[in-house]
Image (spheres, grey):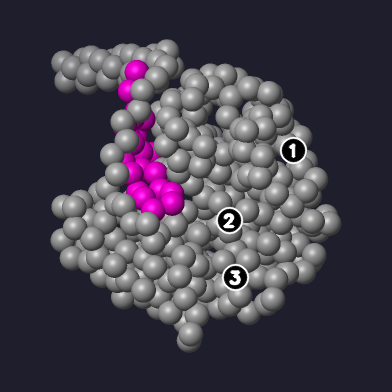
Amino acid sequence: MKNLFVVLIILSFLSCEQQKKEEILSSRELSRIWVKDILKDSTLSIRTFEEIDGNIYYAAHEGKAGVLLNDGSRVTDLYKYDSILPSFRASAFNGKNIFYLSIESPALIYKLDYHVNNKVYLNHSLVYKETHEKAFYDSMKFWNEQEGIAMGDPTDNCISIIITRDGGNTWTKISCEDLPNVTEGEAAFAASNTNISIVGNHTWIATGGKASRILYSSDKGKSWEIFETPIIQGTQTTGIYSIDFYDEKSGFAIGGDYTKPNDTLNNKIRTKDGGKTWQVVANGMGPGYRSCVQYIPNSDGKELVAVGFKGIDYSHDGGDSWKHVSDEGFYTIRFLNDSVAYAAGKGRISKLIFRE
């Protein structure tokens, strides 16, 4: 009985500590940001990377890729298919291997080993090739070690979706018979590798262009339905550029028109019902065009950060209001915890620390 009493006291203490942490996060408002470049290379344009055990694996255009090790050193690699130097804008890590996906025809997926036991393995093998004049892939993610998904622009009358169920060794393209039809001018943007958001078995895919909608699957890509959005759309450069979900119900999407980056009308939308319906928020206020938006971890879905070539913006109230915290330009961002993130862009990868 005494041991049980001690356990109950410990559990109560831990519960109180967690509650205090949640209260602090829910009440804080970040106002400062510290940016430290960990890679500067004017020859690179980086829209995708993976952080693994403190090491940053990145892939860029013209077949360029590499690893920034946590000791500050850098190992580079060059991908070449026949005479083609592929351009990479999407990557994913399934817990065992990293995958890089190139954009244009031939669309290529490479599987490579990763840093283990203080060694760097850049051995890579080609696991998927798609040759089609309209091929253009935008984003990829894994549900688990075995199952993953990638999406791209339509080559027929549906968004291109390929899926693996064997750890990335083979990929199969879903037939348009099993997907919603696209509307005229509907495609997607390879802006930040954040067209896909996954929570558990739930998957959301954002499209853009003349039509900007959400494809949704509740069963890891076995069935699909489509939801309309009120985000700005109607031209080839408008729509959703990035989507993120905090949990199964709460999600946020951002975009706009990259040719009119200061426009703030109808470019930020939020859902509270799993993507079925969306509402415009902060209309005419806050950031204009941004290429990536992410929820800050452990923030109860209240804190968001959006980045783009016009700078970094922060919201502490789920997107209702925004604070411009930096003019530093990036294409994409990923959080390690509630205060530290990595971001990549034109000629750089940086470590970001957010402060109150």
The residue wearing badge 1 is 232
In this rendering, the answer to whether 51 lies above or below 306 is below
In this rendering, the answer to whether 341 lies above or below 313 is below
The residue wearing badge 2 is 190
Crowd class of label 1 (few under 14; some 14 to 19; many from 20; radius 10 Å):
many
- Where residue 306 appears, as percent x and y from the top left, is 51, 35
Label 2 element class: loop
Cα separation, mark 3 vs mark 2, equals 11 Å
| Residue 73, disc | none
**Looking at the image, which is closer to me, 78 or 269?**
78
The residue wearing badge 3 is 104
Crowd class of label 3 (few under 14; some 14 to 19; many from 20; radius 10 Å):
many
Residue type pointed to by label 2: Ala
Residue type pointed to by label 3: Glu
Q: Residue at x 27, y 47 (%)?
A: 38
Q: Are marks 3 and 2 in contact (CB under 8 Å)?
A: no
Cα separation, mark 2 vs mark 1, equals 18 Å
- Where residue 293 appears, as percent x and y from the top left, is 53, 38
Q: Which residues are magenta?
A: 335-356
